[in-house]
Image (cartoon, rainbow, N blue to C red):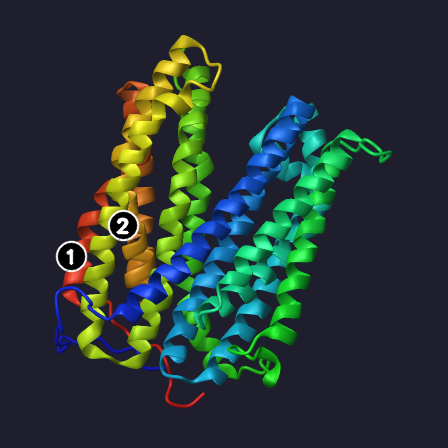
């Protein structure tokens, strides 16, 4: 595998003028954004239904979802590694390596899914006790986890196949699968949680059965599409599981820093949330409620940013693979400016809607005041996040620069954000909105090193081999 950087890239124009670039970018972005919005709505509907059934059941499911968050981040990492390497090969018009990279991704994804499933099957109570000591919540969580653990490998395999299709420009199927999953999950949850239409009332187990069924149908649909309908990837046209040591090693060298960066960040998320739950003084309980409400709307808008990062990774990988030296930097500048504009628009939307959205909640006056302040803070965070995430994960990592992302995320979260947040909360005892700003501060200050990295041109790396 050659991993070359160059300082001899000639700029074509400051912004890319090729309309095909914009069509491809926004086509992928639109479908991925819709898919993610539907997928996020599945979680929201689950929460609403479980919350209307039992607060203890809702807390049990929420505890298990902390574990599933690690599974989700692992799936995203494996998919990103697939996109980074496969997109470069696709940009060269070489389909056999694309299929073999997908084969490696599927084997790694299956292994990770089975690992998580085994750990949760062997140590369910110990894992749940890490998040809560409430016996009733642990009992509900264990009932939920006993079924949910079977969804882990299904979820990862489905997402790997959809990522492979995304590399070759097939994106609509992902949205359709998410819609089908939403309908199935919602219907089964309604029937089995509450015991409608003569079915037994299963409570939290019913929610787990609904999710398991939806995940199984997702995998079945995408498998059938890849096997019988796809005309681009043609995965089954050769033995894609026979990858060879060189290509497997190439993939693992790309995947290792991506997975490490994702998991290090994922582990920090519940720790950051726990800081608000242990604030000194009377604001602790109100802070949890206020932050939960405020970040709900932020997460919805964050879906747009994640979609832009995913679309950017695909188009940048293909550009690097084509070796079009005049286009690489102009594409990067174009996407960077677009992301900044998207962030400003999303921040304005969040600011204009935060009042009407908060009015729909029944919070204590103090919690409402905190939620209002936190949402204003998140408007500023939104601009930084909308720039740094797509540029870091899309432009830099999508172009093969995976180590920079690992170093930046590790240093920013564990050397800056976590100590700063702990000091702000427990030593300086700053107001809640400022503590939240410290927790989210990496979304802002990572922008400068990312900007300088893009300017350097050292992120342009060819990861493909002449022979595979």
Q: Which mark is residue 388?
A: 2
Task: State the count of labels.
Answer: 2
Task: Report the residue marked by disc 1.
Answer: 452
In the rendered image, the quadrant that contains the C terminus is bottom left
Q: Residue at x 45, y 10 (%)?
A: 364
Query: Relative to 251, is 428 on the left or the right?
Result: left
- Report the residue at 35% width, 77% height from top: 463
Tell me the element at label 1.
Answer: helix
**Vertical side of 67 occupied by 57: above or below:** above
Residue 226 location (% of width, % of height): 60, 72
Asked whether 338 or 251 is in front, the reply is: 338
Q: Where on the picture, by quarter, is residue 83?
A: bottom left
Residue at 33%, 43% (x, y): give it: 413
Q: Earlier in the sequence, mark 1 or mark 2?
A: 2
Residue at image point 30% right, 71% down:
20
Badge 1 crowding class, 10 Å Cα cut-off, few under 14, some 14 to 19, many 20 or more, is: few
Residue 195: which quarter of the image?
top right
Where in the figure is residue 360, as x and y percent of width and height?
46, 20
Instruction: Tell me if residue 87 comes above or below residue 377 in the rendering.
Output: below
Q: Is residue 325 visible?
A: yes
Q: What's the CA distance linking mark 1 and mark 2?
A: 12 Å
Give left or right: position of 142 versus 26.
Answer: right
Quadrant where the N terminus sits is bottom left
């Amino acid at each position: 595998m050659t991993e070359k950087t160059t300082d001899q890239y000639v700029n074509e124009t400051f912004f890319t003028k090729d309309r095909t670039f914009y069509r491809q970018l926004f086509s992928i972005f639109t479908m991925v954004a819709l898919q993610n919005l539907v997928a996020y709505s599945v979680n929201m509907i689950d929460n609403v239904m479980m919350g209307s059934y039992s607060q203890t059941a809702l807390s049990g499911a929420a505890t298990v979802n902390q574990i599933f968050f690690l599974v989700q981040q692992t799936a995203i990492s494996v998919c990103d590694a697939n996109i980074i390497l496969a997109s470069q090969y696709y940009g060269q018009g070489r389909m056999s390596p694309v299929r073999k990279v997908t084969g490696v991704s599927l084997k790694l994804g299956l292994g990770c899914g089975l690992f998580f499933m085994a750990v949760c099957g062997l140590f369910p109570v110990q894992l749940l006790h890490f998040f809560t000591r409430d016996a009733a919540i642990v009992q509900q969580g264990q009932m939920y986890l006993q079924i949910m653990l079977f969804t882990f490998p299904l979820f990862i395999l489905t997402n790997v196949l959809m990522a492979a299709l995304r590399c070759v420009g097939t994106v609509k199927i992902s949205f359709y699968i998410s819609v089908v999953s939403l309908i199935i999950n919602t219907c089964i949850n309604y029937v089995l949680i509450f015991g409608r239409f003569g079915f037994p009332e299963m409570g939290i187990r019913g929610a787990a059965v609904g999710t398991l069924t939806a995940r199984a149908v997702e995998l079945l649909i995408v498998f059938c599409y890849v096997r019988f309908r796809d005309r681009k990837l043609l995965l089954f046209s050769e033995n894609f599981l026979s990858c060879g040591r060189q290509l497997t090693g190439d993939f693992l060298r790309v995947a290792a820093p991506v997975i490490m960066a994702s998991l290090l960040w994922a582990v920090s998320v519940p720790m950051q949330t726990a800081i608000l739950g242990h604030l000194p003084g009377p604001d602790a309980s109100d802070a949890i409620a206020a932050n939960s409400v405020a970040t709900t709307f932020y997460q919805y808008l964050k879906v747009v940013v994640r979609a832009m990062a995913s679309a950017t990774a695909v188009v940048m990988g293909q550009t690097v693979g084509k070796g079009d030296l005049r286009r690489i930097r102009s594409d990067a500048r174009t996407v960077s400016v677009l992301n900044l504009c998207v962030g400003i628009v999303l921040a304005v939307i969040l600011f204009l809607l935060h009042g009407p959205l908060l009015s729909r909640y029944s919070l204590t006056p103090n919690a409402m005041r905190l939620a209002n302040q936190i949402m204003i803070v998140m408007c500023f965070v939104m601009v930084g996040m909308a720039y740094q995430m797509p540029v870091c994960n899309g432009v830099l990592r999508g172009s093969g620069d995976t180590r920079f992302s690992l170093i930046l995320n590790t240093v920013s979260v564990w050397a800056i954000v976590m100590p700063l947040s702990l000091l702000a909360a427990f030593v300086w005892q700053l107001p809640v909105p400022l503590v939240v700003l410290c927790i989210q501060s990496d979304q802002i200050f990572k922008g400068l090193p990312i900007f300088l990295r893009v300017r350097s041109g050292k992120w342009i790396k060819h990861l493909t081999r002449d022979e595979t």
